[in-house]
Image: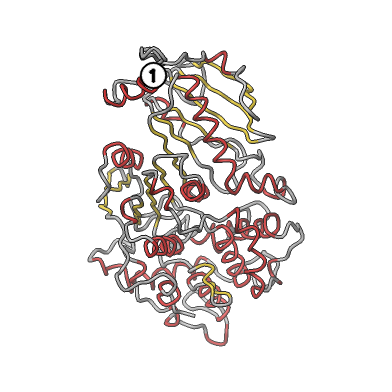
Amino acid sequence: MNRCFFRKELSTGLLLAVVSLLANQSGRAQIAACVPCEQMQHLHLPEVTIHTATLVEPGEGDPVPGRPHCRVLGVIGREIQFELLLPSDFNGRFVMSGGGGFVGGVSNGLRGLTDGGYATAGTDVGHAEPDPSKWATFQMERQLNFGHMGIHRTAVVCKNLIARYYGADAAYSYFFGASRGGGQALMEAQRYPEDFDGIIAGAPAFNWTGFSAKFIQIAQKMYPDGKLDKPVLGDEQLALLQSRILEACDERDGIRDSILSDPEGCPFDIETLPMCGAGAPGPDCFTEAQLDAIRAVYTPLVVDGQLIHPGFPFGGEAEPNGWRPWIVGEKGTAGAYPSLHTYFGIETFRHLIFNDPEWDYATYDFRNLIRDIRYASHYLDATSTDYSAFKARGGKLLIWHGWADPAVSALDMLHHYRAVRAADPDVDEYIRVYLLPGVLHGPGRGPDHVDWLTVMRNWVENGNAPGEVVASKRLDGRTVTRAIRPYAPPAEVTPGSDIPAMRNRQ
């Protein structure tokens, strides 16, 4: 099939509409001329340089096997690197991938979709190194690119290149990101509503300064000596903590499976945990310092009456990818840092908030927090509750989150969603939220796989708003599934009062 034409999957009406838009002055419909792959490198676009444009055939060692495609590598502006894969048999759909963590290096986790006829793209959002100590300090352009400009500029350029290559715009455009990529997803919907028709945000790291502050608060209790060498909690305490929580709440859904279906509704009280006599640590009890660290994880961070972060829900404390790598830490987890919380929290404060490589987490005074994060929050955080422009253009947003996520709190995402819902009671027309029990920041005990792109396409292209979805997981050679309904907040919960009241376990 001529690559200038969309695949037959697209409706006849849509194809005729595209042809009509490209009709010449005499009224004779025609597809605009396509730019061959080898000539894409010579296109002249403002502040865009195409380094290479290579036609890749199956079996030539490219990371995407099976389907011929044109691989375009380029740079936008001073240093936003990007990759765009253009399949020979285009299905009319563009899908862009988000990046995780501090990104660094071109991130296109959706390359495999090129085999299905999708044009896919990814970017390094303006820096090749993942650690902000190497790219962020006093580098305002890079900080802005990381915050929101890198994804937007890459989306605009790639959509233009798609039109040049195929002779017509993509019929539909989608964005799919998780973690920081999920934060990028919310940022796109809030700041650049015209970029994508459908946006999928997984475990969105959208409240970047808020959760970084929470990480610092936890670190001060987990490593109170300021040396980041030995956490106050060990594996025995994590196992005991999880067992007590499961004892209280595991069977509230009628199933004993070590998964909390509704962590919000779990009535477990931290103050019922057994205290160690004379303050001596032991495997069957907790010292006051250990309880302080646990409280710091679960309870909200509130400064001057303002909720900065709601804390983390119960669940996943002793799981292999739960608290140990993220919250408690162990040697070698994140380079010089013992935990991923300390890595992301301290690096953010040093290089994106204070631009001070010597900033010390242990002596930080949270009374100054709101003033200190105000500037960085403007470009790092996607916390606006105004999605009106995205709604007006017909955009759709799917958010999914693991209930047991120890990295990005599901409670933080829910607080944001409730605030959006309070501002617009019709939010279900364009945003749906799914919470996955037992799922961490990645796999956990609970089923975590859902074909979100198919769900989104059905919503955007066919008008079928998603209801129940089925999550699946391979476990011990068999597939287990769980039906997940869209989240609906309790009627009595109102934004501004929900999280602090609900987590009143100081």
Q: Which is more toward the observer, 220 or 26? A: 26
Where residue 420 appears, x then y in whole percent?
41, 60
Q: Does 216 sit left or right of 259 as displayed?
A: right
Residue found at x 67% / y 55%: 352
Task: State the residue lying farthest toward the front.
Answer: 26
Q: Does 465 sit left or right of 370 as displayed?
A: left
Compared to 334, does 291 lie above or below?
Answer: below
- Residue placed under numbered mark 1 in the picture: 89
Task: State the residue lying farthest toward the left.
Answer: 254
Where residue 364 appears, x then y in whole percent?
69, 71
The secondary element bearing badge 1 is classed as loop
> Please, what is the three-letter code of the amino acid marked with disc 1?
Asp
Q: Which is more toward the observer, 386 or 303? A: 386
Residue found at x 38% / y 24%: 117
Q: Which is more toward the observer, 322 or 354? A: 354
Q: Does 459 sit left or right of 311 as displayed?
A: left
Compared to 15, does 406 lie above or below?
Answer: below
